[in-house]
Image (cartoon, rainbow, N blue to C red):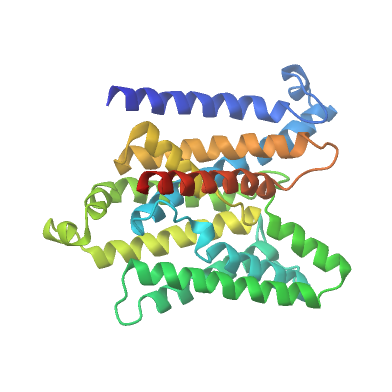
Amino acid sequence: MKSHRVAVRGLLLLSVVVLLVAPLVGMHALSWGDIWLEGARGHKIFWELRLPRVCLAWVTGAILGVCGALFQALFRNPLASPDMLGISTGAAFGAVLSIRLGLTFSLLPGLSGLSASAFLGAGLATAVIYAAGSWRRGGTSSLLLAGIAVSFLFSSLTLIVQYTGNYVDSFRMALWTMGSIQAVGFGALGTTLPALVLILCAAVFWAPELDLFLCGEELAESRGVSVGRLRRGLFIGVSLAVAVSVSACGPVGFVGLMGPHICRRIVGPAHRTLVIVSALFGGTFLVVCDTAARTLWAPAEIPVGVLTSCMGSFFFLWLLLKRERRRS
């Protein structure tokens, strides 16, 4: 337990350091003196562009980290993650449809029509997955298969919409589906930060039930856990939180897969600690990746989703090879 507390404090300290340093890094290097000089170029770059972007990256990464840990517990599968179960592709379909139809409305400050459409797309995918997976009281394996099927369905629909668009719209659609952190001001935090707080509180509240659920549904039910209620609550809560993050930044893949895996090796499988550490790791990891994405090829930017997908692909292969080695 002492080593777990050290790990949590270490990751918390690393998160604070990254949050303080990342806004100073970029094509235009800033010093602490520049950012306090009101009206200066550095002041605007720091407060209106970089700091909101770094905060949004941290909150999004933390949401994906928590949701990845919860999905892996729900499906009792270490390879399960939100972006592999159709929710991200549903959000992508909603966003590209919004671009194709030219919807430019804005519901709330920080919630554009594109973000709202992505959220609705993710919500539609969630409803379809849950309805298909629950047909005739199917279990978590049915939900997993339904998620994979819905992912393919919405990917196909997204390609059809992209194919019918003009050159400019097709480029915007392709860029959005790569996943990138774009923020001017703190408006986007108005939707993502409450989602992080709610899903983290729910995860800590459900942690003892999740620990029992990992030991088997029958054992959990014998200890008083309502497995059906837990499964429904987890699936709907995680899906909505992921929908909020995807609607703000696009589908940023593999953070929810890698984060919980690495954190489980550090702090063990107990969920009360695991979800907190996964949030810290996911947030820090995405800030570092986004900082690299906007500086490695400056003045151009690499979509951060491309970087995380590259790293995630190698991580996924490493996991598979490790499993095969254990079996042999």
Direction bottom: furthest residue: 136
How many numbered discs sit on the rendered protein? 0
**Which image quarter holds the N terminus?**
top left
Left or right: where 224 falls relative to 319? left
Residue 237 rendering spot, x and y as whole percentages: 41, 60
Q: Is residue 24 visible?
A: yes
- Occupied quadrant, residue 276: top left
Left or right: where 35 falls relative to 143? right
Residue 48 rendering spot, x and y as whole percentages: 74, 38
Direction left: furthest residue: 222
In the image, residue 3 sits, relative to residue 104, either above or below, namely above
In the image, residue 55 sits, relative to residue 123, either above or below, namely above
Q: Is residue 120 visible?
A: no
Residue drawn 53% across and 29% down? Answer: 15
**Closer to the camera, 219 or 117?**
219
Residue drawn 67% across and 29% down? Answer: 22
**Closer to the camera, 169 or 20?**
169
